Image: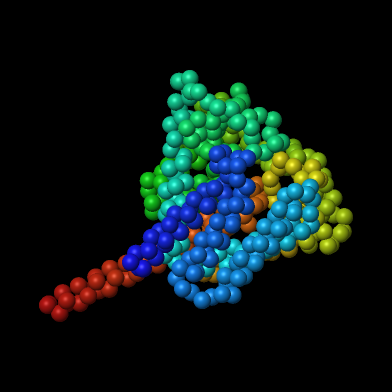
Amino acid sequence: MKKTKIMFFQKAHQVLFAISLLGYLSPYYTWGRLNRFFFLVVPVILFVSFEILHLKTNCKKIILSIGITILTSYFHLRAYFMEFSFLGFMFFILSVFLFLILLSIPPKEAIVSWKNFLWLFALTLVPGIFIYFLRFNFDIPFKEIPPLNSLKNYNYLTFAGSLFPNLSSTQSLRFHGIYGEPGALGTYAALILGFDKFRNKIPCMIILFSGIISFSLAFCVLMIFNIFFIFKRKLLWVIFLFAIALAGTTSDELQTMFFSRLTFTEEGFSGDNRDKDQFKQEFDYFITNNNISDVVVGKGFRASNLAGGAGGASVRMFVYDYGLLGLFFVAVVYFSILAKNKTKNNFLAMLAYFMSMYQRPWIYNWDFIFIFYFGSFFDFMESGLNFQQQNLIKHSDQGSQGEKEGIV
């Protein structure tokens, strides 16, 4: 009976880990109801209960995880209710160490959690895909809700697990799923596919299609990286890319939404729209004013918002808030994970993560670290199994050949 209970709680942990990550992606039904930080506390509770359930007397790790959770909660809430707080940097550093503690869960737990999340993420996209196409031919009774980001000047329309901006422009054609931004959906989709490499075909095909109709520039760039450096059957993928590019030349909507952002102008890359001009000027001054301490440790949590960066999202904002020391801590986290799961694919996936940081710098958040850790562990274990199978086949062939020679 005791063994049955443990197995039940193990499965419950694996599902709840996946649900907590999905909640941290901020689906629209959590807006105004649950703070993202809640979905960081849940894994801590699961971790502690898992340790106790398995009668592991690692009290230091349990006490440390609880203590850091309390401290991060304090710094998070302090920074949340204040416009600016340098203590927000402490929240960032403590969060990093908290992640490293949480990532010590058993291998089997990690792999099952990855598969659960993959299926859960894919299934949440399915209703939205159907509504995405039905709305062009049917009058759907959408409900209007305000945006999560108060700086956005439009509301959203929701219905049956789908979300669309209430706009008449081509932006309304971009697929959001249940998430606030198609660019965020595209980034998650490309990073997930880079790890799984279509080993779980059905959820990956759903995620791939969702990424395509999100018309996300990040999805396109990261998928090109995946195709040339990670995926197999490169010729088929190149043909696939060529077909999409050809479709773009005959569609005014695609030209406006996507291909026009791939051009270069006198002001630079047209797709580089992650920062406001005011903040770009402030950042240039921040880098060149010879204040070494600011550049090293940054100006503090949310300082970039006060400097004109509110509503933006780029690596400039991260450096402005957390400095070069913040970048160092991010590198420590990802190299620590990579050291546990050394494969060529995982190293390339880490490069893709740092590429995505240019336009979505928050790769130290629970969602990005979860995807990287569990995805890299899944790839590491799958690569190990494939290697063992290849060795078995090789030895089997050698044995068969030896038997034939002996018979002769």
Is residue 30 positioned above or below 392 on the image?
Answer: above
Q: Position of residue 165 (x, y in %)?
A: 59, 30
**How is the model colour-coded?**
rainbow
Is residue 55 positioned above or below 305 on the image?
Answer: below
Identify the residue at image location x=63%, y=40%. Answer: 32
Q: Position of residue 113 (x, y in %)?
A: 45, 57
Decide if residue 98 is in sight here. Answer: yes
- The quadrant where residue 398 appears: bottom left
Q: Position of residue 287 (x, y in %)?
A: 82, 54
Q: Position of residue 180 (x, y in %)?
A: 59, 38
Work out whether residue 112 or residue 259 is closer to the camera in this orientation and state it.
Answer: 112
Q: How many marks?
A: 0
Work out whether residue 252 or residue 235 is closer to the camera in this orientation and state it.
Answer: 252
The residue lying furthest to the left in this view is 407
Quadrant of the rendering where the C terminus is positioned: bottom left
- The quadrant where residue 91 appears: bottom right
Is residue 191 positioned above or below 385 on the image?
Answer: above
Identify the residue at image location x=74%, y=56%. Answer: 88
Quadrant of the rendering where the N terminus is positioned: bottom left
Work out whether residue 263 or residue 181 is closer to the camera in this orientation and state it.
Answer: 181
Decide if residue 327 is in sight here. Answer: no
308 relative to 99 in the view: left or right? right
The residue lying furthest to the front in this view is 1
Identify the residue at image location x=66%, y=29%. Answer: 154
Identify the residue at image location x=55%, y=64%. Answer: 102
The residue lying furthest to the bottom in this view is 406
50 relative to 145 in the view: left or right? left
